Amino acid sequence: MEYYQHIWRILDTHLDSILLILDEIDKLASSNILMQLSRAREAGKTDCYIGIIGISNKIQYKEQLDERIDSSFGHRELFFHPYDAEQLKEIMRNRTDAFQPGVLGSGTIELCAALAAKKHGDARKAIDILKEAGELARRNDDEAITDQHIKQAQNVAEINRVEELTSGGTIHAKLALYSLASLIITGSKESFSTRDVYERYEQMCELVGYDAVTENGLYKQLKEQAFLGIIESTKTGGGRSQGSYLLHRLVTNPKHIIKAVHRDSSLDTLPSLGDLQDFSTITNESSQATLDSSS
């Protein structure tokens, strides 16, 4: 509370009005900061007029706002569409001086732009693909970037992105993501219930020697990953016998999740991509044997 009082004093002493620009405002969706700022003058905490410009690449972040914050904002939305392939090409051409002459072929930038435009339209990610393709060519002692370098780079860039998003998360957040990814890879569905993910998560905790959190604790980890945009969670009805429940699916390739999680050295005992199918077969046979012995 002392910090807020200090802010109000500064505003009243030096300003009549202020416009705050908050990048990635979605990260404050459940924070008290937005409530304090949006209602400061109304509550008599300051005489300064406060305006807020919030920037987010998550279109649905508004749904996570407290109703009181949403009401006091009285906001208008402006949408900036993702870059198309032509725009991405122009942006990437400004980065060509980072490469030696002859390294970039006639269609290199065009392919990077086309892949990025098709997937996300994000200029930073498109540049990451080009940069990683150059690194692959350099490591292989190749004189020029090929289409194969670019396609490999796209996978590496996506794994790097997932690792960056999960790096600040807990071990259990990574295990939750890994569990969902492994279910998708070894199963025949793209989405699974919290209960399904929890059962696989308990198996993974046992493998790496961590005590599992509760099912509600796992749900909170999945909710956080949905907030980061790594997974999507949707409520569905299971009929009278089951009621409603959540289904979780990955937004990115599950193989990228497996590889990103494996970069954490504390989780290197988790099954690799090549071992996942065998792991699933073993656990299914074990479950069936338990059922047979109890029947």
Image: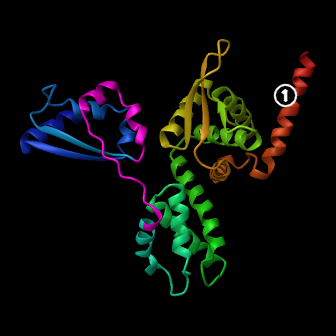
Left of 194 or right of it: where is 29?
Answer: left
Location of residue 92 in the rendering, given as x and y in whole percent from the top left corner: 44, 71
Does the stretch in magenta take in 253?
Answer: no
> Considering the numbered disc 1 on the image, is that residue within a helix, a strand or a loop?
helix
In the image, residue 220 lies at what x, y percent?
A: 54, 30
Q: Where does residue 57 sit, x and y in percent of width and height?
A: 41, 47
Q: Is residue 11 left or right of residue 160?
A: left
Q: What is the residue that sits farthest to the bottom in this orientation?
A: 101
Q: Nearer the viewer, residue 97 or 164?
A: 97
Circle 1 packing at 10 Å, graded few (<14), some (14-19), many (20+), is few
Q: Nearer the viewer, residue 185 or 79?
A: 79
Q: Is residue 142 above or below residue 167?
A: below
Q: Quadrant of the N terminus?
A: top left
Query: How many numbered callouts?
Result: 1
Q: Residue furthest top?
A: 240
* Residue 100 coordinates in the image, percent (x, y): 51, 85
Q: Looking at the picture, does residue 66 appear above or below residue 91? A: above
Tell me which amino acid carries mark 1.
Ser
| Magenta-colored stretch includes residue 60 | yes
Q: Quadrant of residue 104?
A: bottom right
Q: Which residue shows up at 37% across the image and 35% down it?
A: 62
The residue that mark 1 highlights is: 287
Locate the C terminus by quadrant: top right
Which image quarter: residue 204?
top right
Determine the image quadrant of residue 16: top left
Residue stretch in magenta: 57-86
